[in-house]
Image (cartoon, grey):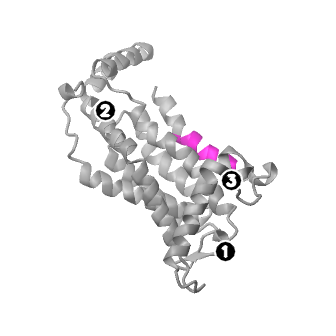
Amino acid sequence: MSRKLLLIPVLMILMIVLAGCGMEDSGLMKPIDPENGFWDRYFVFPLAWLLEYFATTLNSSGDPAFDMYGLAIIIVTILLRLLTLPLMIKQLKSSKMMQALQPEMQKIREKYQKDQQKMQQETMKLFQSHNVNPLAGCLPLLVQMPILIAFYQAVYRHSDIPGHTFLGIELGQPFWGLAILAGITTYIQQKMMGTQQMNPQMKVLLVIMPVMITVFAFYFPAALSLYWVVGNLFTIVQYYFMRDMYKLKTGDAAK
């Protein structure tokens, strides 16, 4: 089960990379148009429209000296996080439940350390007896996959965004500072979620995810890194204020 969970962030990053690398070959570099098909109509075009709307609204004077696309990316990122907030709350509750069950899971690991199949069976029985879904915490990641890919294309295929800057950073080009921030904020977010309290296989996520995000962010447009950093900061603040909401004991997990 743990190995399957580890595959989720790996697949998420892989999909983004493949989407970016294959855009020119597949013809996806053409201008964004809702008539291009389902993907453009319901994913890429709405994001591009929102970015354009907020950038234009914030720069009501039309003065090109006031570059608002960076602020537009921040606003759209926060809006997207607010829309997925119910899923994030569910992830928080799932994380707290998993932490509450850690003592029982440790006993199972110690008892069946020589029988991996039996260990997995008993672990699943424990989850079922407390109505815990170990995959619930991964749902926000799965939801973010199409959003990230669509956001990447909305930025990369936009006629204006790649040429704009934010705090001196060119949004259409990679920027090492944002790449490092993306990795650091990913690490802090996972730390707050209690990844370090999971079993050894899941603890690997605490290192793998920040490293993967940082490495790939060195090749992504800075706009996407900005999206990731702002999203992480939003989640960190959310967890800070909601960290005491689900103080569960093992016996409470079934409620």
Amino acid beneath label 3: Pro
Determine the residue positioned at 54% across, 83% down: 66
Which residue sits furthest front? 35
Q: What secondary structure characterizes most of the magenta part?
A: helix
User: Taking 128 as reference, is 33 above or below it?
Assistant: below
Residue extent of the magenta highlight: 9-20
Reading the image, the residue beneath label 3 is 34
Residue 248: x %, y % from top left: 20, 35
Query: Badge 2 is on which residue?
Result: 98
Q: Is residue 216 visible?
A: no
Question: Residue 122: where, in percent of width, then height?
Answer: 35, 15
On the rendered structure, is 127 left or right of 40? left
Residue 19 belongs to magenta span: yes
Q: Which amino acid type is marked by label 2?
A: Met
Q: In which quarter of the image is residue 55?
A: bottom right
Residue type indicated by callout 1: Gly
Q: Give the residue at mark 1.
A: 163
Marks 2/1: CA distance?
A: 45 Å
Q: How far, Cα to Cα, is label 2 from label 3? A: 42 Å
Say if mark 1 contacts mark 3, CB within 8 Å: no
Q: Which of marks 2 and 3 is nearer the N terminus?
A: 3
Residue 38 seen from this side: yes
Left or right: residue 42 versus residue 142 is: right
CA distance separating discs 1 and 3: 23 Å
Q: How crowded is mark 1: few (under 14 residues within 10 Å), some or many (20 or more)?
A: few
The secondary element bearing badge 2 is classed as: helix
For residue 191, side relative to residue 3 (left or right)? left
Please, is residue 67 above or below residue 46 in the view?
A: below
Q: In this view, does 227 lie to the left or right of 191?
A: right
Q: Nearer the viewer, residue 128 or 54?
A: 54
